[in-house]
Amino acid sequence: MTTETLQIPDFLTATLGFAVYLLGVEINARVATLRQFNIPEPVTGGLLASLVVLLLYLAFDLELSFDLATRDFLLVVFFAGIGLNARLSDLISGGKPLFLLLILTLTTIVAQNGIGAIGASMFGYPAQAGVLFGSASLIGGHGTAIAWAPEVAEATGLDGATELGVAVATLGLVLAALVGGPIARLLVEGRNLSPARPDEDHTVGLPTDGDDVSSKIDHLSIMRVLLFLNLAIIAGYSLGEAISAAGLKLPLFVPCLIMGIVIANLRAWLAPSRPPIERTPSLALISEFSLGAFLAMSLMSLQLWTIAELGLAIVVIMSAQTLFAVAFVIWVLFPVMGSNYRAAVLAAGFGGFALGATPTAIANMTAVTKRYGPSPIAFIVLPLVSAFFVDIANAIVIQTIVNF
């Protein structure tokens, strides 16, 4: 039987994404275990929807193909919001954590590719294909895996390199969405940690319990936030074109993040008496909506059947990668970053980042901070590492391995 593909247009994809997000909210409200282990609401709904998509494929040989233009725009909105939240004082105080996280990320990239190479050789793949079982697909995500697969195929003669990379990235995204919350629960509750400044406003999302912030959100505060988000995105587009013209290729969300930082700090300097944008409930709310809808659409559109085609190899290698990631964040990253509450939040984020993608990491941290309290610097440090450093470091390591 020939597989039939049903194209889902962008507007309908977005509508389904909102419904899937709300489904996750309803399920989490009814299942205490999900809340206790800090599983993000869009993860719950998105994974359930992806299972429905899988059943349609298995039962009716029907493949759903989603137009994800709105999803990709929401990612840009989210990172522009992260930039608007970045105070210059935070960037300065985050210098040491940023440097340490850079070193830990590079260590993870090397280790993932070592595990991938060993696993690939065990199951009859070329050792160089280990990058597709490693950092190209995990820390790099779907985009990096697809970009590097042709070079791996050319260097090794491996058929189906793209499908391999996509399958590993898909399973990694699922695992990333599930490990961060339990890690944070283990560290925060096991060590009785709490935020150093619990009264600070949340960077992303509103607290699950606590003071009612609805009185701080009105149509004017929402309009101000949307205006400055749009300004950051417009400036980010221009900066992105300039960067591209200079020969450097970066995802659009990176220059939008940069311009968000610039605009927020210029505004605070030039008009300090004006109503704030950064660290406001309105910006936190819009950031959480953008991230949640992005993640719900990303997970519901996963093609889980690609994983099954790799059988035992992907099960064994990804189990090893997951065990390494969890052990690394608990016994290396957490103590190196200070063994405090911020380190626990970063551990939850890094667990998602190491196996999946930056949005998954931020979603993990959001679920944790909504329950236990804010950690603003964590939301600055991790995106800066993932936006600026990872693609460059990953490219150097992958290129070295592929050409070995």
Image (spheres, helix red, strand yellow):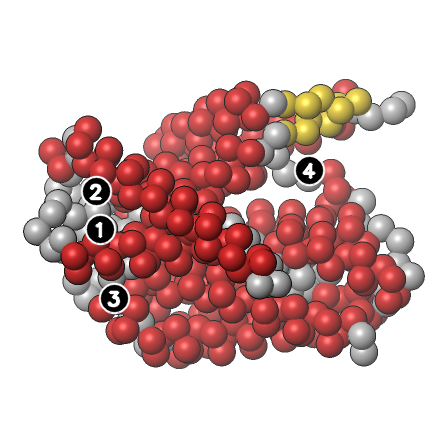
Q: Residue under circle 2?
A: 281
The answer to whether residue 358 shows anywhere in this view is no
Q: Dot 3 corresponds to which residue?
A: 88
Q: CA distance from mark 2 to mark 4?
A: 35 Å
Mark 2 residue element: helix
Crowding at label 1, few (<14), some or many (≥20) Cα neighbours within 10 Å?
A: many
- Which label was assigned to residue 279? 1
Q: Nearer the viewer, residue 25 or 316?
A: 25
Q: Is residue 202 above or below residue 218?
A: below
Find the distance from the CA under tag 2 to the CA under tag 1. Answer: 7 Å
Q: Amino acid at mark 4?
A: Gln
Q: Mark 1 and 3 residues: CB-CB less than 8 Å, in contact?
A: no
Residue 215, position in %: x, y? 11, 33
In three-dimensional space, the C-alpha distance between marks 2 and 3, rounded to whole angstroms, equals 20 Å
Residue bearing the label numbered 4: 303
Q: Label 1, secondary structure: give it.
A: loop
